[in-house]
């Protein structure tokens, strides 16, 4: 756990169009001890531009992890997930689907497209904070992630 705190902050990409959920995620991450930098995009097209370092995202860092909502404007999160996992440069980045949908079809489809995990967002504020902190505690302190140069 200590090694992550001594390293440069881990880059995270949140793909979320709901401003309230963005604010809750930021608040939950601020309460933890893991050094991270959260980048936020609000639609699927911007997510892929960020990941591919296109246009205004030419200098974007490669995220260590992606938090992806499924219900996005411009390009659906399901399409974004499929594009990420089809790209040899991006496919190694863990994608955590964090969405309001608890549909078995969405869950099955996300895993079929190689999502690394699927979490249904709780409606309750405290539970939402606990979920985001649990994601961070597991994915950023326990899991060994590939370095940016290896992705």
Image: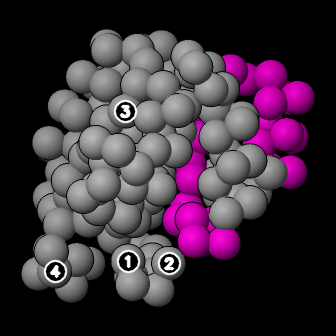
Single out the mark in the foreground, 4 or 1: 1
Label 2, on which residue?
A: 151
Q: Which residue lies most toward the front here?
A: 55
Within 10 Å of the Cα at label 2, are there few (<14), some (14-19), or many (20+) other Cα atoms?
Answer: some
Contact? badges 2 and 4 (CB < 8 Å): no
Which of the marked residues, 2 or 3, is nearer the chain's N terminus? 3
Which of the marked residues, 2 or 4, is nearer the chain's N terminus? 4
Instruction: Tell me the CA gap for discs 4 and 1.
Output: 13 Å
Label 3, on which residue?
A: 41
Instruction: Tell me the CA gap for discs 2 and 4.
Output: 18 Å
In the image, residue 127 lies at what x, y percent?
Answer: 40, 26
Residue 7, which numbered label? 4
Instruction: Tell me the CA gap for discs 1 and 3.
Output: 20 Å
- Tell me what residue is drawn at x 57 percent, y 53 percent: 95
Contact? badges 3 and 4 (CB < 8 Å): no
Residue 111 showing in the rendered view: yes
Is 29 covered by the magenta stretch? no
Residue 148, which numbered label? 1
Instruction: Tell me the CA gap for discs 3 and 4.
Output: 25 Å
What segment carries the magenta color?
88-112
Within 10 Å of the Cα at label 4, are there few (<14), some (14-19), or many (20+) other Cα atoms?
Answer: few
| Residue 48 vertical position relative to residue 107 in the rendered view, above or below | below
Within 10 Å of the Cα at label 3, are there few (<14), some (14-19), or many (20+) other Cα atoms?
Answer: some
């Amino acid at each position: 756990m200590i090694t992550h705190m001594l390293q440069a902050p881990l880059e995270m990409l949140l793909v979320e169009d709901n401003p309230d959920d963005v604010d809750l995620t930021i608040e939950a991450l601020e309460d933890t001890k893991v050094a991270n930098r959260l980048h936020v995009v609000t639609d699927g097209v911007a997510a892929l531009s960020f990941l591919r370092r296109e246009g205004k995202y030419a200098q974007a860092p490669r995220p260590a992890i992606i938090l992806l909502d499924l219900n996005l404007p411009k390009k659906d999160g399901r399409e974004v997930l499929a594009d990420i996992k089809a790209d040899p440069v991006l496919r190694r980045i863990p994608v955590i689907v964090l969405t309001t949908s608890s549909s078995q079809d969405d869950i099955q489809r996300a895993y079929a497209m190689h999502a690394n995990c699927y979490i249904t967002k709780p409606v309750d504020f405290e539970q939402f904070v606990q979920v985001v902190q649990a994601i961070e505690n597991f994915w950023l302190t326990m899991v060994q992630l590939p370095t940016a140069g290896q992705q």
